[in-house]
Image (cartoon, helix red, strand yellow):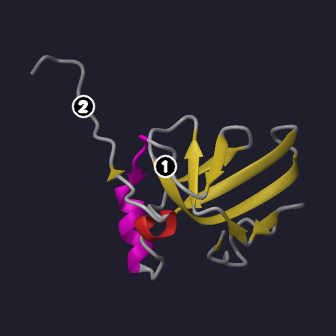
Amino acid sequence: MIKLERMKETEHLTRANTIEVLESEPFVENTRGRLIHRVRRARYNPENPYLGGRLLVVDYWCKASASGHDELSFHAIPPEGKFVCGICEARATMAGQPESDTVAGKHVHKGRVKAVRTCCNG
């Protein structure tokens, strides 16, 4: 478990029933994504009125975020064969967080997703 960065008071904590998550596993997997991300901040709303149920929002070190509940899985070690987001890794370590290799106790592959044009044969 790692301590998460605290949210500013102006960031989403004013919404009813929102709970700031203070500790979590260091890596998060989103079933809708390709990379494993480093967790920067997280918040939980057990009674989200828009979804008719619980909602978890996770902010990544790469400045992206994800929301959902069943789609997000936290890990102490990235799943085998998956890549940790290279931007998350760089920003987390620049902010003083330990490297993914250190956290996992073994080498962790880092990577990125590259957009490729699939139309207009030119």
Q: Position of residue 85 (x, y in %)?
A: 40, 54
Q: Quadrant of residue 51?
A: top right
Q: CA distance from mark 1 to mark 2?
A: 20 Å
Mark 2: which secondary structure?
loop
40 vs 48, nearest the viewer: 40
Q: Secondary structure at mark 1?
A: strand
Q: Is residue 33 left or right of residue 119?
A: right
In this rendering, is residue 47 above or below 59? above
Residue under numbered circle 1: 36
Segment tinted magenta in the rendering = 81-94
Residue 7 percent coordinates (x, y)? 67, 75
Judge depth for marks 1 and 2 and give the one in front: 1
**Residue closest to the far front:** 106
Q: Label 2, on which residue?
A: 116
**Which x, y percent locates residue 100?**
44, 65
Three-letter amino acid code of the residue under disc 1: Ile
Residue at position x 36%, y 60% from top?
A: 87
Main structural element of the magenta stretch: helix, strand or loop? helix
Residue 22 lies within the magenta run: no
At horizontal 48% and vertical 49% (from top left) the residue drawn is: 36
Please, what is the three-letter code of the amino acid marked with disc 2?
Val
Query: 76 or 51: nearer the eye?
Result: 76
